[in-house]
Each structure stands twice: as C-alpha cells, then as structure tokens.
Image (cartoon, rainbow, N blue to C red):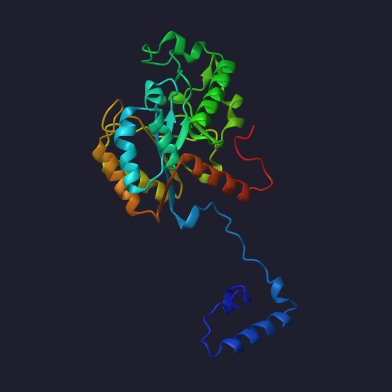
C-alpha cells in the first residue's frame, strides 16, 4: 500500500496497528479528491542528467595503440581490482598479431576493444611531426580512404571479440584527411568518438557531443595527480576520460605505481565513481541525453 499516497505528506511510516486505519484514510482522501488510487500522478522524473546508482562522476580508463605494457601491467591490475577499461587497438601494431589471444581474452573478461584505426595516420604538417612516415601521413590520405580503413578496422575488431557496438579514438585527435574532416563519414558506425587531447574532464553532460568527446593523455604523473583529476570530475558531476599509453613501460608512460594508486582509489570509491568501459558510459550518456531532450536531435547527430 505504501505507493498509494504517492509521496508528499502521506509518505510517513505507519506503525503496525495504525496501518489499516491510515491506508483507509489515504484511500478516502484520494476518492475525496476525485482520484482513483491507480491514477495517482507519477513522480516527476529527474530533469537533470544522472549517473547510475547515484554516482557522482563517471571515469573512463582507456589505453591506446595496443602496447605490450598494457597487457603485461595495466590489464592484470585492472582485473585485480575488478575494473573494466577500454583498449584502443591500432590494428597494424605487431602486438595485435603476436598477442591476439590475450587481447581476445581481455574482451571476454568485459574490457572493451576500441577502434584506433589500422595505421594510426596523423598529420605530418603539425609541429614536431617530422617522424610521420609518408605512407601514414593523414595530410595525404583522403577522407574516403580513412573511412574505408576505419570501417574495416571495426570488422577486424568484431572478428576478435564478436561484438557489434564500438567506439573510436582518432589517432592524436587529428581529423583532417587530405584537408577534409573524415569523422562525419564514420560516425554512423560508432556509439561515440574521442577527439582532441587537452580536455579530460567534461564540462557539462547534457551538452557533450558524443562524437567529439575530449580526452586527457597523462604521462609522467603521480597517482595523487590522477586522483585529483578524478575528484574534479566529481565536483562537476561529469566524467573524465583518461587516455593512457605505456603503463610501467613503452612510451608516454605512467608508472605502474601511479596507475595502481588510481585503481585502488577508484575501487575503494565505487559508489562515488562509476568506472566502466567508454562504450558503456557513452551508451548511458546517450540514453540520458535522449531522455532529457526527447524532442530534439542529439548533439552531433548526422
Ligand atoms: Zn594513438
């Protein structure tokens, strides 16, 4: 009977003796007001963006490029803490061929294998990009070539993990292929896309474009610094997107100790922080955005 009153002044906790009397009074009150019990107005749905189970912020841990140190150091630590993360594979990286069973196993344990393109093309024309090989120069790759390759990468990832839904991280956040933005040509194949690398903590969830999610790519930082960024996301009630590279090895590294401190903090504060794959988080974000703006087009939709 507790739902009859619909909350408000009648939502007290009746004792066992008074229960029947109170229920009868409530029913009479509803009839007097011209309402049948079944027609009690539904509670107003929350009109603000909300994370599952009252979490204050979402945390996405992502590891780009398919590096050995991720399999050797990051993955065992994540599994030890029961935390799911996203691994963005550059499919031409030798580690994918050499250790495919390990990547497949990671997916089987609930981690996400994300698309990070076949060849990691990026713009040689940008400062300090002399090292970019001519055949992997995004400046001289057409938007159509990038589209074909990125879609093929999705097929290859499905061959590895059997999944149909995917997210993408644009290598270095570069989007101009042969001078044209190639992302509009691949959006339909993804739940969400990460670009850029100067953000990390999202400003406002209702305004976030799922196809232009900012990331932070920390390297050489301490556990305390990483935790401070997570706390900032909680203050804003939004999300933070970490894009790691090497963990305890490889390049753009974060030490295994700093990584471990972050995981320990997240595992100890699961009710405050929802740490999950980028795919799961963005599926939730899109559902919430649709709920809050049912009549309008979601941001970034083609
Ligand atoms: Zn990368």
Q: Residue at x 60, y 88 (%)?
A: 20
Q: Quadrant of residue 254?
A: top left
**Residue 16 seen in render:** yes
Q: Residue at x 24, y 40 (%)?
A: 257
Coordinates of residue 135 in the picture (x, y in percent): 46, 10
Q: Residue at x 60, y 60 (%)?
A: 45
Task: In the rendered view, tell whether residue 214 sits above or below residue 267.
Answer: above
- Between residue 77 and residue 238, name the one nearer to us: 77
Using residue 231 as the reference point, say whether residue 30 is left or right of it: right
Q: Quadrant of ligand 1?
A: top left
Coordinates of residue 217 in the picture (x, y in percent): 37, 32
- Between residue 48 and residue 264, name the one nearer to us: 264
**Residue 222 seen in render:** no
Using residue 262 as the reference point, say whether residue 62 is left or right of it: right
Q: Quadrant of residue 245?
A: top left
Tell me the quadrant of the picture where the N terminus can be found.
Answer: bottom right
């Amino acid at each position: 009977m507790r739902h009859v009153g619909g909350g408000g002044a009648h939502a007290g906790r009746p004792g066992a003796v008074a229960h029947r009397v109170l229920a009868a009074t409530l029913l009479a009150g509803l009839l007097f007001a011209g309402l049948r019990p079944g027609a009690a107005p539904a509670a107003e749905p929350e009109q603000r963006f909300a994370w599952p189970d009252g979490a204050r912020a979402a945390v996405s841990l992502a590891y780009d490029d398919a590096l050995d140190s991720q399999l050797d150091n990051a993955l065992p630590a994540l599994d030890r803490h029961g935390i799911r993360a996203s691994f963005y594979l550059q499919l031409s990286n030798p580690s994918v061929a050499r250790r495919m069973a390990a990547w497949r196993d990671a997916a089987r344990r609930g981690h996400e294998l994300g698309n990070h393109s076949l060849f990691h093309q990026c713009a040689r024309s940008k400062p300090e990009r002399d090292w970019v090989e001519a055949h992997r120069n995004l400046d001289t790759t057409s938007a159509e070539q990038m589209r074909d390759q990125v879609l093929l990468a999705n097929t290859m990832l499905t061959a590895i993990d059997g999944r149909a839904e995917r997210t993408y991280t644009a290598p270095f956040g570069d989007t101009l292929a042969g001078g044209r933005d190639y992302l509009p040509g691949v959006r339909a194949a993804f739940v969400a896309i990460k670009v850029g690398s100067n953000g990390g903590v999202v400003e406002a969830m209702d305004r976030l474009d799922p196809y232009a999610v900012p990331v932070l790519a920390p390297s050489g930082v301490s556990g305390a610094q990483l935790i401070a960024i997570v706390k900032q996301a909680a203050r804003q009630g939004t999300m933070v997107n970490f894009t790691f590279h090497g963990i305890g090895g490889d390049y753009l590294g974060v030490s295994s100790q700093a990584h471990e401190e972050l995981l320990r903090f997240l595992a100890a504060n699961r009710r405050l922080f929802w740490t999950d794959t980028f795919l799961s988080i963005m599926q939730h974000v899109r559902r919430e955005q649709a709920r809050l703006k049912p009549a309008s087009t979601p941001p970034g939709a083609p």
